[in-house]
Image: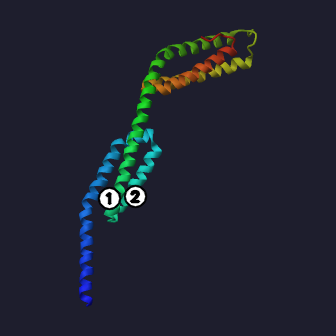
Amino acid sequence: MKKPSLWLATLAAVLVVAACQNQRAPAEQAVAAAEASLTSIRDAATHYAPDQLQAVDAQLSTVKDSLSKGDYKGVLAAMPSLNTAIGNLRDTATAKQQEADAANAKAKDAWGPMSTDVPKMVDALQSRVDILSKSHHLPKGVTKDSLAAAKTAVDSMKSAWSDASNAATAGDFATAVSKGQAIRDQASQTMHSLGMTSG
């Protein structure tokens, strides 16, 4: 009586193994497709949605672990969720990249006049500092300390402007304009401290 039940148990085991093997190819293909899909957006996701990418990578890692253990059923069950996560990541990264591109295009327009105006302000400051440094009598409201601070500020602005120009040359106009605006603000304050009128 025990032999038939043993035979049935063996048959059941064989059928389970066969079923698993039947699921192996679809599971491997599904994981490969998910990896390829994630690879295609990895650069954009790394830049625009790093936290979300990290979560999707962890999800993929779990699925790949199940695949390596032969849990093909578990892999196939997890794929819809993983594919949705990859799709959401693609949408987020694409939207943020479009926003960044639009902001950069707007900044590029602003950079044109700024690239002329700010160097003029810095040059005017440099000229004023040079004149005051040679003068024996400082104008009313200007002290030796404020003149020294202005000298330091001009050097700082020149260095910062170099960084801004490099950013613009690299096509990163958003950063260039951000740095340029900071220099413009600093130049205005420094001009005020030297009794100049800023344009």
Q: Secondary structure at mark 1?
A: helix
Q: Secondary structure at mark 2?
A: helix
- Dot 2, how many residues are within 10 Å of its Cα: few (below 14), some (14-19), or many (20+)? some
- Which marked residue is nearer to the observer: mark 2 or mark 1? 1
The x, y position of residue 115, in whole percent, is 49, 17
Q: Quadrant of residue 29?
A: bottom left
Vertical placement of 170 versus 134: above or below? below
Quadrant containing the N terminus is bottom left
Judged left or right of residue 197, residue 175 is left
Of the numbered discs in the image, which one, if any, rests on residue 62? Answer: 2
Of callouts 2 and 1, which one flags the residue occurring earlier in the amino acid sequence?
A: 2
Query: Please, what is the three-letter code of the amino acid marked with disc 2?
Result: Thr
Q: Quickly name the residue at label 1.
A: 76
Judged left or right of residue 174, residue 185 is right
Q: How is the model colour-coded? A: rainbow
- Give whichever of 121, 101 is nearer the camera: 101
**Most extreme residue toward the bottom, as rendered?**
1
The x, y position of residue 122, in whole percent, is 58, 15
Q: Quadrant of residue 119?
A: top right
Vertical placement of 59 versus 100: above or below? below
**Most extreme residue toward the front, as rendered?**
1
The x, y position of residue 153, in whole percent, is 63, 22
Give the residue displayed 24% in from the left and 88% down from the top: 3
Give the residue displayed 39% in from the left and 36% down from the top: 94
Of the numbered discs in the image, which one, if any, rests on residue 121? Answer: none
Give the residue displayed 41% in from the left and 34% down from the top: 97
- Give whichever of 39, 167 is nearer the camera: 39
- Give whichever of 55, 23 is nearer the camera: 23
The x, y position of residue 140, in whole percent, is 76, 10
Judged left or right of residue 141, residue 125 is left
Query: Please, what is the three-letter code of the amino acid marked with disc 1?
Result: Leu
